[in-house]
Amino acid sequence: MKKTVLKVEGMSCSHCENAVKKAVGSLDGVGSVSVDLKAKTVTVEHDPSKATVDQIKNAIEDQGYDVV
């Protein structure tokens, strides 16, 4: 499992956190997702052969947030 930390703009509340966790967590190969609203980061443990960083970014962006 690989740990990837992404900087995400636009998250401000628990609804945002839950939307990101649900979207990323539903990807095949994702083990865990944690969101830090203050630091504006999403930390994902994933199997890179199943869930690529691009797929994770797309899942977050599909929820309306910007990965920077």
Image: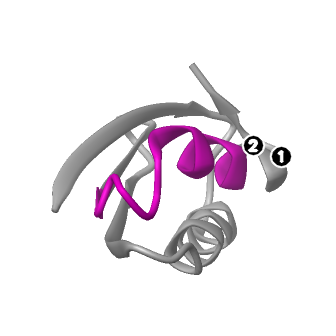
Determine which residue is flagged by label 1: 64
Residue 20: percent from left, percent from top? 61, 63
Residue 53 within the magenta-colored segment of the rendering:
yes
Q: Is residue 53 above or below residue 3?
A: above
Q: Residues within 10 Å of mark 2 (few under 14, many from 20)?
A: some
User: Mark 2–mark 1 contact, CB under 8 Å?
Assistant: yes
Instruction: Determine the CA span between mark 2 and mark 1.
Output: 5 Å
Residue 6: percent from left, percent from top? 41, 35
Q: Range of the magenta residues?
A: 45-60
* Numbered disc 2: secondary structure: helix
Determine which residue is flagged by label 2: 61
Residue 50: percent from left, percent from top? 43, 64
Name which residue type carries label 2.
Answer: Glu
* Numbered disc 1: secondary structure: loop
Residue 21 within the magenta-colored segment of the rendering:
no
Name which residue type carries label 1.
Answer: Gly
Q: Residues within 10 Å of mark 1 (few under 14, many from 20)?
A: some
For the point 47% across and 48% down, the residue is: 52
Q: Quadrant of the N terminus?
A: bottom left
Residue 62: percent from left, percent from top? 82, 51
Q: Viewer-proximal residue, 41 or 29?
A: 29
For the point 58% across and 70% down, the residue is: 14
The quadrant holding residue 58 is top right
Q: Which numbered mark, 2 or 1, is in the foreground of this view?
A: 2
Q: Quadrant of the C terminus?
A: top right
Q: Relative to residue 9, is residue 21 drawn left or right?
A: left
Q: Viewer-proximal residue, 58 or 33?
A: 58
